Image (spheres, rainbow, N blue to C red):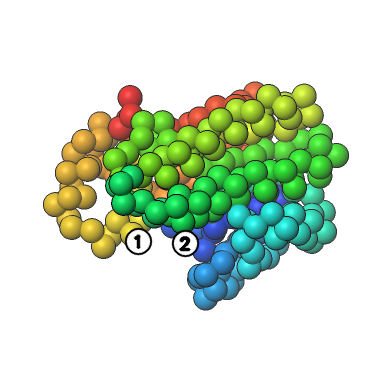
Amino acid sequence: MLLKNKNALITGASKGIGRAIAHRFAAQGANIAFTYLSSVEQGQALESELSAYGVKVKGFRSDASDFVQADKLIADVVAEFGTLDILVNNAGITMDNLLLRMTEEAWDKIMAVNLKSCFNTVKAACKPMMKQKAGSIINMTSIVGLKGNAGQANYAASKAGIIGFTKSVALELGSRGIRCNAIAPGFIETEMTGKLDEKTVQSWRDAIPLKRGGSPEDVADACVFLGSEMSTYITGQVIQVDGGLLT
């Protein structure tokens, strides 16, 4: 097992990509701490599901975009698990609109949840990871952060910010044995895309060189790689999981 006995924290893990990451990590032997916020029932269900893998599991209802809560979260995870080996910043939302119609609130909310949350958790995780002289930080960005997208100026800016943040952290913490990378998913088929018009979804699939949408597990597998010892010489990178869409 690639992650046996490693302790991982995954933010925003109650559904979608975060949930897939938690399952993949647990299947590879990692002990799992995860956060949820509004999806209380799904978070509690996930805790039960992950326990079936025979690893230690604990869910935390916590808002990573809140500096104080994030600091307490990291402290609680280290107290509960002993170490923090892998941090996956997956929590994120969208509030799409054309720039002319976008409110200040929509801009600020996206920046807080998507970008500030990364700063909050990584800053708090620095000390325990520096103390153990090891750690893998994985920040979830998007191909939208690389190419932009009409109607998503706030989301694109937040995801582009994550890329700059990731590269800076990699430069600062590399000498301490801490790696920091980002994953940029493309069109990933989740519960959300399942509600869209099939013709629209198929047109998106047709535009992808691999001719299919990605699955949450495709992204989760990249996270397993970056969290494992197979990627010990990789840091400061953005790995696109997009079927060749942005090539």
Question: Left or right: where does residue 190 sit relative to residue 59?
Answer: left
Q: How many marks?
A: 2
The residue depicted at 56 percent of the width and 30 percent of the height is 164
Question: Left or right: where does residue 23 sit relative to residue 216?
Answer: right
What number is the disc on residue 191? 1
Image quadrant where one finds the C terminus: top left
Q: Amino acid at mark 1?
A: Glu
Q: Answer yes or no: is residue 115 visible.
A: yes
Give the quarter of the image for residue 59. Answer: bottom right
Outermost residue, bottom direction? 41
Image quadrant where one finds the N terminus: top right
Question: Left or right: where does residue 56 sit relative to residue 230?
Answer: right
Question: Left or right: where does residue 5 sit relative to residue 222?
Answer: right
The residue depicted at 68 percent of the width and 48 percent of the height is 121
Residue 222 against residue 193 in the figure, above or below: above
| Residue at image mark 2 | 15
Could you say where residue 100 lies in the image, as x and y percent from the top left? 30, 46
Q: Amino acid at mark 2?
A: Lys
The residue depicted at 54 percent of the width and 53 percent of the height is 113
**Which tag, 1 or 2, sits closer to the chain's start?**
2
The residue depicted at 79 percent of the width and 29 percent of the height is 176
Could you say where residue 196 lies in the image, as x and y percent from the top left? 23, 58
Residue 58 against residue 218 in the figure, above or below: below
What number is the disc on residue 25? none
Depth order, front residue of 68/21: 68
Residue 130 against residue 237 in the figure, above or below: below
Q: Residues within 10 Å of mark 2 (few under 14, many from 20)?
A: some
Depth order, front residue of 160/9: 160
Q: Are marks 1 and 2 in contact (CB under 8 Å)?
A: yes
Outermost residue, right direction? 131
